[in-house]
Amino acid sequence: MTASQQIDQQIARLDDWRGDMLAKLRNVINDADPDLTEAWKWNTAVWTHHGNVCAIGAFKNHVKVNFFNGADLEDPEGLFNAGLDPKRRARLTSTKAMRSTRPP
């Protein structure tokens, strides 16, 4: 089974807001950079390009986005809210937590 198929399967198994959130995040990530490659590591969706870039995972009551080199990212709106190591994470607790940053 390919990594993309494993991600499809994970999303399909989640029949609540977490599956919707993973699907939306997957689309955002894939649209953001066509050079990223979907991978399946540590039983979660990971995107790579000359190394790990980001990962998304569903937990009991939240979805987490992990940026492997997130400490290098600016965060003027304070979206990163978990972790103190070089990785940066955003913990989302509903689809309402995700909003578009694109201009109208």
Image (cartoon, grey):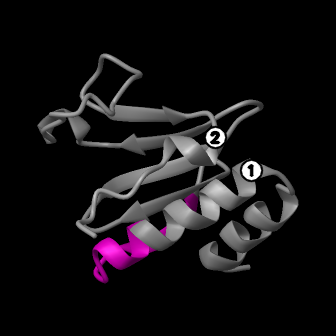
Left or right of 60 in this view: 49? left
Q: Position of residue 74 (x, y in %)?
A: 12, 38
Q: State the residue position of label 2.
A: 94
In the displayed structure, 4 sits above or below 101; it is: below
Residue most toward the top? Answer: 84
Q: Quadrant of the N terminus?
A: bottom right
Q: Nearer the viewer, residue 92 or 104?
A: 104
Q: Position of residue 77 (x, y in %)?
A: 22, 33
- The count of marks equals 2
Is 10 part of what is drawn in magenta? no
Q: Nearer the viewer, residue 85 or 103?
A: 103
The residue segment tinted magenta is 29-40
Q: Residue 47 — which label?
A: none
**Quadrant hosting residue 75:** top left
The residue located at (32%, 43%) in the rendering is: 68
| Label 2 neighbour load within 10 Å: few <14, some 14-19, many 20+ | some
Q: Quadrant of the C terminus?
A: bottom left
Q: Amino acid at mark 2?
A: Ser
Q: State the residue position of label 1.
A: 17
The residue located at (31%, 16%) in the rendering is: 84
Q: Describe the element under mark 1 as helix, strand or loop.
A: helix
Mark closest to the chain's N terminus, 1 or 2: 1
In the displayed structure, 19 sits above or below 5; it is: above
The residue located at (16%, 41%) in the rendering is: 73
In the displayed structure, 35 sits above or below 18; it is: below
Q: Describe the element under mark 2 as helix, strand or loop.
A: loop
The residue located at (15%, 34%) in the rendering is: 76
Kindly indicate whether the residue at mark 2 contacts the one at mark 1 (C-beta within 8 angstroms): yes
